[in-house]
Image: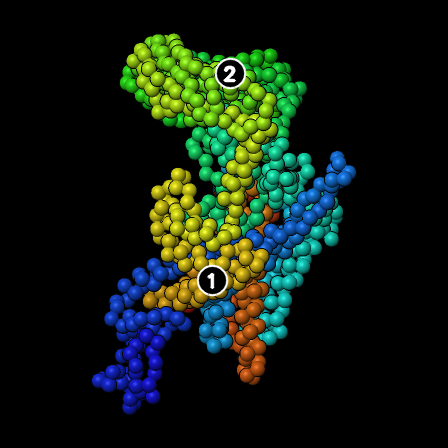
Amino acid sequence: MVIEASGIMPDVEVGPDNTYLIDNKTFVSKDEVYGGYKCADRGMLLPIISEYTWSIEVRGFLYLVGLLYCFLGVAIIADIFMGAIEKITSKTRKVYLTSEKEEEPEVIEVRIWSDAVANLTLMALGSSAPEILLAIIEVIANRFEAGALGPGTIVGSAAFNLFVISAVCVVSIPNGESRRIKDIKVFAVTAVFSIVAYLWLVIILKAITPDEVTVWEAAVTLLMFPLLVLLAWLAEKNFCGVPNKTDTSKQIELGNFQPADKFIRDRQYFRDGRLDRDGLVAFIKEVKNYPGLTDEDAAVLAASKLVESQSHSRMWYRVGAVRNMTGGRKTQPQLSTKLKQVYNAINEHPEAPNLGEVPQVKPHQNAIIDFHAGSCAVMEDIGKFKVALCRSGRLDNRVSVRVETIDGTATEEQDYVPINEVITFDPEETEKLVEVEIINDNQWEPDEEFFLKISLLMNSEEREGVQLGRISIMEITILNDDEPGVVMFQKRGFLVKESIGNAVIPVVRKNGADGEITVKWRTIDKTALNGRDFTGGEGVLTFKHTEIEQSIEIPIIDDMTPEKDEHFEIELLDPTGGAKIGQINRTAVTITNDDDFNNVLNNMMKMTNANIHAMQVHHETYVSQIKDALNVNGGDIENATAGDYVLHFLTFGWKIVFSLVPPPSLLGGWLCFFISLACIGVLTAIIGDLASIFGCLVNLDDAITAITFVALGTSLPDTFASRAAAMQEKYADNAVGNVTGSNSVNVFLGLGLPWLIASIYHAAKGSKFIVQAGSLGFSVGLFSGLSIVTIALLMARRIFGVFGKAELGGPTGAKIFSGIFMIMLWFIYVLLSAFQVTGYFSF
């Protein structure tokens, strides 16, 4: 008889006395064949080539690297899988609301899927698919016999999720802030089920039918999954218990729609929760308080603010975490250093956390503190100068704010003396002066800028009765005074309406302001003609000593006849006084019809919408999917970091392979869903082989390998996702609220389904499906006890003031204590489980 060895060994023929004939040459014993090739029979698919001559050390290292690399592959295909889920769960239906115009009712689109149902079905499957599929594949590969790797991974992953992820979320909240679980009823249901699920495993493995799982036990385990979903849905709908002050059912029906928030309305130009025209105008007015921002900058800021203001699922954060780990396209717009400062300043308006109309200040309730101007320019040799902080509104109280400097192109200690001080206004005091000192190094440098920023103090008592005004950040430009400078236009093009009267074109002097200089200008006809469309010609601009800006005024002729856009150019030439012409020595002025001027705003809306569209978690076409796979940071090279390049290089192979998966836009996302799930299944089978063989090579039991290496590898993306959700969301639901639900689903699907299949198979054969309680029973029992302690701690944090009455964050000391305590619970779980497996004690 010839035995095919599937690439592991050459063809082997059985010889006398149970020996083996290899290549018709030598008889050796079975022990000699497999004893020198350790762990060759542990995998279902691996090894694929003969490793007979490799050392155990080399094999162990390669299998560990392969295991880690496959974890990255699973994370990437899970990203695509999550995109399919997002496409499926984002299906909407139209809801008609009354509006001011009776004949035109307002139409909004709301999600069909309930949040609780989506979180416990598709989204839980998306985040737990590797663990669930590993358990299913292991049972099938073992010919419907129980294994240790799959169940161990499920319990180990649950322990890591509950103990470590909760600890990370608790301590990640910024000092002075806290996060509470909003939908506490749904959390209560999932928390109870997460404990019942593992206690149920102990009962069936140790009490009812020790070391055996029957068909009815497996069926009950699986049926707990739809029961969990039903009860969570009922809790979300508030069918039982004391009614909420607000009608929860209506809130669920309308999803996250808030009619007062103009940026969440469904409008003509933007759909599915994107901004509308009025909201964009309001936001642009707010942004324009900060100098030097282009229309593109404003569009990026609007997209960032809109993304922040919208409610996101745990899946959105998980996709973002995976892309950060793999150098992929980010789920949030990338801001430059300057835009981040402006964005942070906008966010610090206590009355304007979201998009919409700029709020009215409350002069009789709060003192309002802001700068006297949004920007100023000073000479490098000015030394010290004063900047005024103005107070308006309420004047009868004593208030304090913090003023600090922020680097721009100018850096502290080299270009200016840093400031970080508390400014206090006494009652009836309306102005305070802050002294700023510029360092003059007597060397030529280009013009540089830094920022002064006002912020509220951290102590809640000191924040009462005071709010920031509209100008809470001030740009200070340091002008070089050692050179005559460079003269040029601010921009390469300007757009003006035909009825504007005079077009005012600014000319700036940079990199020096020493002495008096002049520069000539002249207009150049293009499609717009001098004398017919504008009054042009030539002239001279004179810059006095230290002057840095002059303007050219060109009269525009309004002929009241519709015509296409026309343009002319203005050129700078012949500078005097040692000055030079800068890079932008020519600018184009486009004259547009008044009716077409609204296209400027439309273009702004399109740019903002494009920024938002680029951040969506799923792809609409193969082209965009493959483009993202080929390029670092999804093609946004400008904002790619060195880490993005390294991670993109490491994961490039996986990205190319999985870019061939159909995009979620096909068949409503279901085609991508099933093909991605199949890919995860194949990778999970390989991970199971890698983990089993690696554990064998380093003499680790499968149960220990499962609760350490495999559990950590499959749970790391969830860790980063939960941390991001904890820091960015107003509530803790997406951070820790979904952990308990995911842990329950892991048991009901990850063990209930494969155990039901295996128990039916054995029942049909008249045999028993044996599941040794041993290490699994001990691990499950230990986790059940520690999980009760952890959930009790989270509830104590919610109730008692010493913890800040919130599950996450709160006072620094209590926050750190809670995090360390939960991390210690995880170490206790891992150590005691490992000791039991290795025989230090029995259970």
Q: Are marks 1 and 2 in contact (CB under 8 Å)?
A: no
**On residue 680, which mark appears?**
1
Q: Which residue is mark 2?
A: 555
- Taking the spot 72% from the left edge, 48% from the top edge, the residue there is 249
- Taking the spot 64% from the left edge, 39% from the top edge, the residue there is 267
Q: Earlier in the sequence, mark 1 or mark 2?
A: 2
- Taking the spot 73% from the left edge, 53% from the top edge, the residue there is 239
Given this view, does label 1 or label 2 mark the residue nearer the observer? 2
* Residue 833 visible (yes or no): no
In the image, residue 254 sits, relative to residue 594, either above or below, namely below
Q: Secondary structure at mark 2?
A: strand
In the image, residue 678 sits, relative to residue 311, either above or below, namely below
Q: Nearer the viewer, residue 47 or 447?
A: 447
Measured as percent of width and height from the top left, residue 643 is found at 36, 44
Q: Dot 2, how many residues are within 10 Å of its Cα: few (below 14), some (14-19), or many (20+)?
A: some
Measured as percent of width and height from the top left, residue 555 is found at 51, 16
Which residue is most to the bottom?
16
Q: Dot 1, how many residues are within 10 Å of its Cα: few (below 14), some (14-19), or many (20+)?
A: many
